[in-house]
Image (cartoon, rainbow, N blue to C red):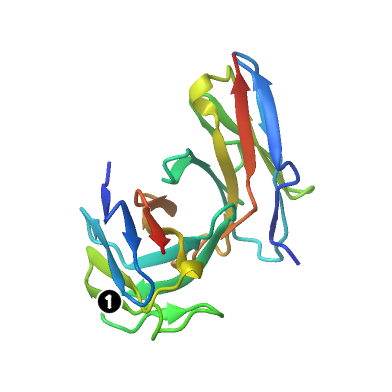
Amino acid sequence: AQKITQTQPGMFVQEKEAVTLDCTYDTSDPSYGLFWYKQPSSGEMIFLIYQGSYDQQNATEGRYSLNFQKARKSANLVISASQLGDSAMYFCAMREPYSGNTPLVFGKGTRLSVIA
Amino acid sequence: SAVISQKPSRDICQRGTSLTIQCQVDSQVTMMFWYRQQPGQSLTLIATANQGSEATYESGFVIDKFPISRPNLTFSTLTVSNMSPEDSSIYLCSVEFFNEKLFFGSGTQLSVL
């Protein structure tokens, strides 16, 4: 079974609008961490935001916020006020447990295109 | 913030040759992870490199094809050996900093002719 599911292969959003990228996960470990990364066409992986399973509040980093719904096992990324430079691939990833030097498991990604 | 330098950033290689990719971190880290991203695909873990011991490889990856060195706490190399066109991918190293957050090097885009 897939650990991380991203159901949107591609998304379009108008510049300055908000967009939500979906991510659901599957784990039986109570301790885990959820990550979002941005990959522009250059190929680098840029860390955006992190949410620990025990964190009480949803994570925010500037224009990025993570809508964490633990009971639904979802960790959607919300980008507010989209910019042309936000056009890229976005990957959701999980680490279980979130300590102990465990690696990340990635979803298949969502390609976001921002339209002027 | 911590810096991860990965070299080379890209290369075009002939089949049957080998390429060594370097990952240098500006602070000491326990684990370094190596990932492969085939064209149009997500990232797949190749191996986990712990300083002072042999790397641990994921299913489908073997040491003869992807030898890894980890001579100290700030440096690691991944070699792609006896390359074929199927090895054309982006290769990325990853390390953990700052409260379990994982960061990546800039990646190596490899094309094998």
Whether B21 is drawn above or below B1: the answer is below
Residue under pointer 1? B69
Residue at coordinates 32% horizontally, 67% vertically from top-left?
B30
Could you say which quadrant of the image residue B84 lies in?
Answer: bottom left
Q: Which quarter of the rendered picture does the C terminus of chain B lie within? A: bottom left
Q: Is residue B103 above or below residue B73?
A: above
Q: How dense is the environment of label 1, judged by Cα within 10 Å: few (below 14), some, or many (20 and up)?
A: some
> What percent of the width, then of the height, locates residue A56?
62, 41
Instruction: Read off the chain for label 1.
Output: B
Q: Nearer the viewer, residue B51 or A59?
A: B51
- Image quadrant where residue B20 sits: bottom left
Amino acid type, residue under disc 1 in the picture: Ser
Could you say where residue B18 lies in the image, as x and y percent from the top left?
31, 74
Placement of the N terminus of chain B among the 4 image quadrants: top left
* Residue B77 left/right relative to B102: left
Asked if residue A79 shows in the view, the reply is: no
Please report the residue visible at 58 percent of the width from the left and 55 percent of the height from the top: B42
Q: Is A104 positioned to the left or the right of B53 in the image? A: right
